[in-house]
């Protein structure tokens, strides 16, 4: 049986350790100690050094005790702010924070579930194939842990990521690609009263471009948004420079590219009409994730759900996670709902029952 008392103790320990992005070292030390005491090899990669953090990702190897394809489980150690001094409280059948901080169930619930599932297999001497745990850093601040992960430490194709809201049984099978965008319009400054005809207003170029852009909900799979606009100094100067930041996301890589091309074309047209210059720069942070029907990882998770009478539910999501990055690197990444709710707010909570039933599911996936 899954041990509710044991997982609650672990979960409470973890959420009480401060771990904002780039500062996950104390949680990493706790987990390393826990795993090494059981005799497992824990390795730390260089992702911390590469991303400016105080620890790398931890990769734990649990040697096989039975047959079957190896499998990895991943959860991130960092939390979004405010996450310093989390005080978890049991409130009826849920766990929440005292109210000043997030709970940090995102994603310490994922870590707890993975470890409790393993403990369960150990308790009952249930055979399992090679299992790897990835405890990643900096997921919340741009998936820098996953992006800088040392893949030589993770010799497995299938990876189950324990990091989504949604009831236990939820399986994220699609997640959008995302691109960050920086746009700069350069006009020509001039005295606005004496010689405005000698100037080119960057604000007018930007306005012309933005007014022609399709933004927000583009279609069922694609979104785009302008995040900020900055420029200008004084009313008596024709504005020389305006810069904007934006993003675009899509479940289809081609649609994302189409949206980026469209936004750039609006900038080019505006410059053609008003004058001046533009610079349109973008970087695709991670590719679209698409778990296909023939995915072995998906089949393995769905079979485990059925074995323990949980109804699997395939869903798309609008946000990116470590799953996108790992998928982009060739892993078969499937993300599970672990029951966390209202994440990234101080109202975040998780049902106790979600922790135990998710542990049961993960244990079932681990079995040979
Ligand atoms: Zn998360």
Image (cartoon, rainbow, N blue to C red):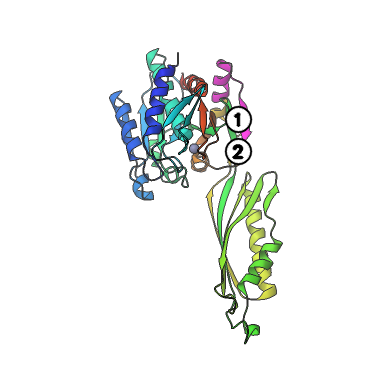
Residue at the image position 64 percent from the left and 66 percent from the top: 267
Q: Please identify the quarter of the rendering in which residue 245 is found.
A: bottom right
Q: Nearer the viewer, mark 2 or mark 1?
A: 2
Question: 35 left or right of 139?
Answer: left
Question: 16 left or right of 285?
Answer: left
Q: Please identify the quarter of the rendering in which residue 27 is found.
A: top left
Label 2: state its secondary structure. loop
Please say if 126 is above or below 54: above
Q: Is residue 314 magenta?
A: yes
Residue of label 1: 294
Please say if 6 is above or below 333: above
Q: Please identify the quarter of the rendering in which residue 29 is found.
A: top left
Which of 136 and 131 lies nearest the eye of the viewer?
A: 136
Real-space Cα distance between discs 2 and 1? Answer: 20 Å
Few, some or many residues within 10 Å of mark 2 (<14, 14–19, 20+): some
Does the rendering let one see residue 243?
Answer: no
The first of marks 2 and 1 along the sequence is: 1
Residue at the image position 57 percent from the left and 49 percent from the top: 178
Magenta segment range? 300-316
Does the rendering let one see residue 190?
Answer: yes
Which of 171 and 5 lies nearest the eye of the viewer?
A: 5
Q: Position of residue 165 (x, y in %)?
A: 55, 33
Residue at the image position 29 percent from the left and 27 percent from the top: 36
Few, some or many residues within 10 Å of mark 1 (<14, 14–19, 20+): few
Please say if 303 is above or below 244: above
Question: 105 left or right of 36?
Answer: right
Q: Position of residue 307 (x, y in %)?
A: 56, 16
Quadrant of the image containing the N terminus:
top left
Residue of label 2: 317
Q: Position of residue 21 (x, y in %)?
A: 41, 44
Is the CB atom of the residue marked by disc 1 within 8 angstroms of ligand 1's nearest atom?
A: no
Please count the marks in the image: 2
């Amino acid at each position: 049986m899954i041990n509710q008392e044991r997982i609650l103790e672990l979960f409470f320990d973890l959420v009480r350790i401060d771990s904002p992005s780039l500062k996950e070292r104390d949680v990493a030390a706790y987990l390393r100690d826990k795993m090494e005491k059981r005799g497992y090899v824990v390795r730390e990669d260089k992702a911390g050094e590469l991303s400016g953090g105080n620890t790398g990702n931890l990769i734990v190897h649990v040697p096989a005790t039975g047959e079957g394809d190896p499998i990895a489980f991943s959860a991130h150690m960092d939390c979004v702010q405010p996450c310093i001094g989390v005080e978890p409280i049991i409130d009826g059948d849920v766990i929440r924070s005292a109210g000043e901080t997030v709970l940090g169930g995102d994603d310490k619930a994922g870590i707890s579930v993975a470890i409790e599932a393993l403990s369960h297999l150990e308790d009952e001497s249930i055979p399992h194939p090679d299992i790897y745990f990835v405890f990643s850093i900096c997921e919340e601040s741009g998936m820098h842990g996953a992006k800088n992960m040392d893949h030589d430490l993770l010799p497995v194709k299938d990876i189950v990521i324990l990091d989504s809201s949604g009831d236990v049984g939820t399986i994220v099978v699609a997640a959008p690609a995302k691109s960050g965008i920086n746009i700069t319009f350069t006009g020509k400054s001039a005295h606005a009263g004496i010689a405005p005809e000698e100037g080119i207003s960057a604000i007018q170029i930007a306005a012309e471009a933005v007014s022609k852009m399709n933004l927000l909900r583009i279609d069922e799979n694609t979104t785009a948004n302008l995040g900020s606009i900055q420029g200008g100094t004084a009313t008596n100067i024709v504005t020389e420079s305006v810069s904007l930041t934006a993003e675009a996301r899509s479940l289809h890589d081609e649609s994302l590219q189409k949206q980026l091309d469209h936004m750039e074309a609006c900038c080019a047209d505006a410059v053609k009409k008003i004058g001046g210059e533009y610079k349109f720069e973008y970087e695709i942070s991670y590719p679209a994730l698409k778990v296909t029907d023939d995915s072995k990882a998906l089949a393995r998770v769905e079979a485990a759900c059925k074995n323990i009478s949980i109804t699997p539910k395939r869903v798309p999501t609008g946000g990116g996670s470590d799953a996108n990055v790992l998928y982009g690197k060739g892993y078969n990444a499937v993300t599970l709902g672990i029951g966390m709710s209202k994440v990234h707010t101080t109202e975040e909570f998780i049902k106790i029952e979600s922790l135990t039933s998710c542990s049961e599911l993960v244990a079932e996936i681990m079995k040979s």
